[in-house]
Amino acid sequence: MKESRRQIVPFALLILAVLSPVASLAGAARNARKPGIGFVYPAGGQKGQTFEVKLAGRLLDGISEITVSGSGVKAELIEHVKPLNGREINLLRDRLKELEEKVKPEKQTDGKSVSGDSVKTSENADGETDTDMDAMREEMAEIKEKLANPKNRNRENPQLAEDVKLKVTVSPDAEPGRRELRLKTNLGLSNPIAFYVGELAEYNEKEPNSKEPDAGAPSNLPLILNGQIMPGDVDRFRLNLSKGQKLVMAVSARELIPYLADAVPGWFQATLALYDGDGKELAYVDDYRFEPDPVLFYEIPRDGEYILEVKDAIYRGREDFVYRIAVGEFPFVTSIFPLGARVGDAATVKLNGWNLPADELKIDATDKKPGLIPVCVHNNGLVSNTVPFALGDLPELLEREPNSREAFAQAITPGIVLNGRIDEPGDCDIFKFESREGDKIVAEVYARRLNSPLDSALKLTDTDGRVIAANDDHEDKASGLVTHHADSMLTATLPADGTYYLEISDAQEKGGTAYAYRIRISPPMPDFELRAVPSSINIRAGATAPITVYAVRKDGFAGDITISLTAAPEGFSLKGPPLTAEKESVELTLKAPPAASRTPITLRLSGRAQIEGQEVVRKVVPADDMMQAFIYRHLVPAEDLEVAVLGRAGNSGAIPKKPNSDRP
């Protein structure tokens, strides 16, 4: 399947999404009274700093705790503002009318008509003194201000109806990187939202900056620019740059909020442009390969002022269109090769990118376990982006050129992982192996899931050229952040003894240094992964709450999977049936201890199954079921499974508010 530049949801599907129950009614009802955070701004801060952040969400009454994963970050509640409901608005209007009757322009005093503003007596006909009248006029002004304040009226997006302001302190020794922020309210825990700890200076945009650029950003690079894009908004920043600077300008937007339920294509699609001082466009990007968040690379041609512009690709905008832009001469890894290694080995990885300290990196996998590890480099005190590096159990082999025709096919023996690259547009790599009738073979590509732009296609043929199996895109439901599942996978039972040829190519006939891949070619290796939804669970003391566990089965595994708590805190228990082959998911019942807990509790789950006579245990990864663009659903992984055990009376111990802090 060819990959489109943008994923646009057909209008008919949008109508279907509105008219039909895409999500289960039970799930919708379950989330109806759950607190939610729509965004946090700024979505991060510098180590050693104290700053204010704002959030918007819903059902956030009684905030009693603000949690940030990891250590070194503390947050305090400053203010919670929620819109007035219809009853409150009517009461305010009635009170205003009552006050207006009492403070008319003219009042009768001792039978004489006088101006309400020029009453000289100490008491009027209704018994109000001058002091009373002043107080009523002040109350009238406050009511009018409340009724006129747009924050006190129903918002266009009910998911962003309430505002929260926090004071955040990041300790100097806090570990840099992504965190998850949650609020605990009277109703329990909110969803987690991304919050980053960084080492660079941070600057928050100053509006208006749509026409005249914001000139307040620090002149010394590197730094982080923070902002929000509202409808039709364009943010511009003025930067003083020097000739020869090899700038990397990387946006985080979709990275902060992976999916928007009520926006097409389902995220904030940021664009970046760089202009010179005369307004001439020098460079423009609207993505980075297959990732929606753009990265702009540019070598500055001369000293002077430049303008960096960020906006939405189709001029949409809303408060949750939040971004962070890293600007500076950062090291940035654009590709690595190979994409992985065998556990227990030491690997030398070739690096490509900007501002790199070297073109190779040594990776020691002798003490690692199978899975993904992050790879990054440092240069001049700055750290690069991270790219995934895969570690596996099977022997590894590098492809050998030339191998683009069957006559030059590289001979292999199944039970290996091949590391290769589609070196140029139109290239293909062909491998051959001997097999016997009835043998089962699995060929699975890892490329897009390892940051490679390759859109792979696989084809398995016999010596007569007959196609035994072929595949372009194979959906991996464990990859909740992937929207185009471009990695290929095929499974085949071989029909006869003989030689077989496996060909890999790019479905869009592209290629280059970055188009690397790993192919597992082996007999079936049954296995499974697990996801638990939601990642924030709210439960009354002594009561129960549901939790749904999804299974991602691999290579035909069809056995039962039993889910259990791992080293559960005292008082917790989990009940429910096993995940059988015919079920994609199972709903389990979590029971809480009899006493409430002020702080959230982290739980861990695991799944057990018998595979080929051996017990296999897999961690259950916390996740949240997110909707994209009205119709698509994804299981997005979270760091922790957090549980709020609430008091029976419904009071979670709210943080005391400042006077009138819940109303502007």
Image: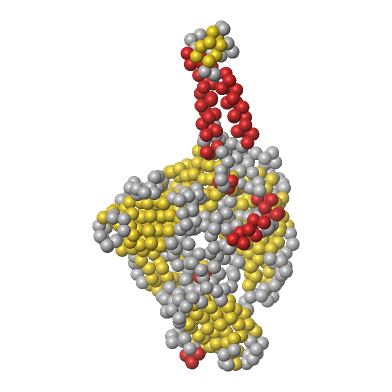
Compared with 423, 545 (above or below) is above
**For the point 51% across and 26% down, which residue is it?**
141
- Quarter assignment of residue 338: bottom left
Residue 582 in view of the camera: yes
Give x and y (percent) for residue 340.
48, 73
**For the point 51% across and 15% down, which residue is it?**
116
Of residues 109 and 261, the one drawn nearer to the viewer in this rendering: 109
Compared with 616, 270 (above or below) is above
Q: Is residue 575 left or right of residue 51?
A: right
Compared with 105, 198 (above or below) is below
Quadrant, the N terminus: bottom right
Give x and y (percent) for residue 106.
53, 15
Give x and y (percent) for residue 268.
49, 56
Q: Is residue 647 left or right of residue 243?
A: right
- Quarter assignment of residue 462: bottom right
Residue 247 in view of the camera: no
**For the point 57% across and 73% down, which residue is it?**
473
Residue placed furthest toward the top: 110
